Every structure is written in C-alpha cells, then in structure tokens.
Image (spheres, grey):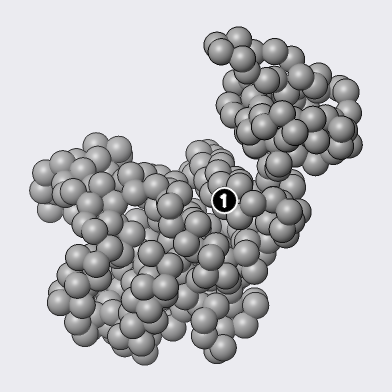
Amino acid sequence: MPISPKILFPSETREFSLYTKRGSHYRLYCYKDDPFTREHKELLLERGIARVYVRAPSRDWFKQYAQTHLGSVLQDHTIPLEERSRAFYDTSLSVVRQTFNQKLPQGLDPAVLQKIERMVKEALSFLSREETLRSLGALMSHDYDTYCHSVNVFILSASILQTFKRFNEDDLVQVGIGAILHDIGKTELPSEIINKPGKLTPEEYRLVREHPRVGQRLCAGAPLHQQSHDVILYHHEKLDGSGYPIGAHGHHIPQCVRVVTIVDIYDALTSKRPYAPPLAPFDALQLMRREFDGKIDPVYYERFVRLLSLTL
Ligand SMILES: [Fe+2]
C-alpha cells in the first residue's frame, strides 16, 4: 500500500518495512527493525518521492501505527493539509472497519470504544476549520458503504455542532462517538437487504427499521455516554413522529441527534445507493427542504446549508 513519507515520524519504532518503487519494481528502503531517521525522510522528500510502500502482510501494522500517530499528524502544520486530511480519512475508516467487523453478537468491545473515543477527540479541532472540510470534501467517498457513511456522518455532524456555542467539548465527543456508531445495528442485517436494488418486502422493511434498536443492544455492554446511545437509537426519528423505531415526537428527540439525522439523510441522498443514483449536493438539499419540512429541525438544516456553501 502506498503512503506519504510526510506522515512518518523519524526515530519511531515500526513493525513494517518501507519500500520505494521504480517502474514496477519495489526496493527495500528501510527495514522494519532499522530506525527511520530524519535523514531518511529528508532524502525522500528531496528526491521528490511522494510515496513509499508497505507490503500487504504488514498493512495492519501500518494501520495501527497510523492510529497511534493520528493526533500528531493532524496537529503538524508542516504536513500539507491534503496529506493530513488523507491520513485522517483513511485512519478513521480503518477504525470504523475494525469496529464493525468485530464479532458483534458479543457486543462492542470497550477497548475498541476507547480507540474510537481517542480518534474523535483528536479529530475535533482539525474538523473545526473550514479549509479542512473543503479538503475532506474532495476525499469523502460517496459509495454506498456503511464504513464511509459512518465517517462522513461524523465529519459533517462534528462540523455543524462546533458552530453552536450550546454544545461543549464533552457533547462533541459523545455525539461524535454516536455518529461513528449510529448504524452499527446494520451489521446484523443480511447483505441482501442492504444491497437490494428493488423495493423491500414488508418483512425486510421491518428488519431495517429495527437497526437503531439492534445498535443500542450491541452497545449495551460498553461504557457509552447517554448522548451516544441517543444518537444510535433516535437517528431515524422525525419531529412530526413519522420516524422509527419509536415514533418519537419533537422535544423527545435530543437536540444533538437532530444534527446527525440531517447529515445522515444528506449523505445517503448524495451517495450511490443500490436503488437510486447519487444526487448532487444542491439537489439533495432542495429535496430535503421540500420533503422533510416539519420532520427535520430547520435551525440545524439552515446551518448545514450555510456550512456546505462555504466548503463545497
Ligand atoms: Fe441508520
């Protein structure tokens, strides 16, 4: 797998060797047990080598390294924003994949939850800047994929929430964790339902409508804050009571969840779904204004439109 030398830290120990590539040949550049020095890094950058490579069997070691160093990468302004955004998007995807691919019938592992919490905390100040959103916008995948969808919903929810003074740092962290985990209940749905191109049968639809409750059950054994649970359980509820799984009305739906609901709908509409092509951002926002009137919170919707207009 290709990686930027800019996100490697000199003198850190690594469990993976680094290779350079000439034509179709890979050449060992730095063996895993040898220190990767400042000189190694400078030489690569001087030669204009934008990518070094990690062999496929060591991929998980690199992902672990990237998770450990994410905070340092995001704060290091000598690394171009585009590289930091790429590191953030890839690393958060690998954390989500790891979470959703656990043996989930046993529930969410508290050690994995800690990883998510750390990633969310490290990402918040990075996500508070408009130029970050602009740069991430170019990277955000619009394939219909629960992993990408979870990361996209986290990025956009955190960005909106940070524009309101009423949400403090702890709210942002807890809602961020909830946003990452909001569709965890879908891991128990058969892939034939998730990827079905046609109309769902009533029984399939009933199962889909249960995924927030299933998600809550999967997370019941992990020390999750109430706000994170609320995001998982209420993210498909609508202000007029037409949502699911409870059919909760207005003030029963927590404020922070309303933000996640808006972003969730937007990301689904702008993604390639099995049953519909993606909508352009403007068309998705128009559709939401038209068809979700009275169902989603207009204050957060307007703030979201403004945020997108600054960053798209
Ligand atoms: Fe969902």
Image height check: is 252 above or below 174?
A: below
User: In the displayed structure, does residue 242 sit left or right of residue 56?
Assistant: left
Closer to the camera in the image, 107 or 240: 240
User: In the displayed structure, does residue 148 sit left or right of residue 236?
Assistant: right
Picture residue at 67% right of the left edge, 32% below the top: 48
Pinpoint residue 94: horizontal percent, then vertical percent. 56, 42
Pinpoint residue 74: horizontal percent, then vertical percent. 68, 56
Say which amino acid is labelled 1: Glu
Element carrying mark 1:
helix
Image height check: is 183 above or below 298?
A: above
- Give the quarter of the image for residue 233: bottom left
- Give the quarter of the image for residue 21: top right
Image height check: is 105 above or below 232?
A: above
Pinpoint residue 33: horizontal percent, then vertical percent. 86, 22
Picture residue at 73% right of the left edge, 54% below the top: 78
Q: Which residue matches tag 1?
A: 82
Check the picture and name the quadrant holding the N terminus.
Answer: top right
Pinpoint residue 182: horizontal percent, then vertical percent. 44, 60
Picture residue at 19% right of the left edge, 54% below the top: 205
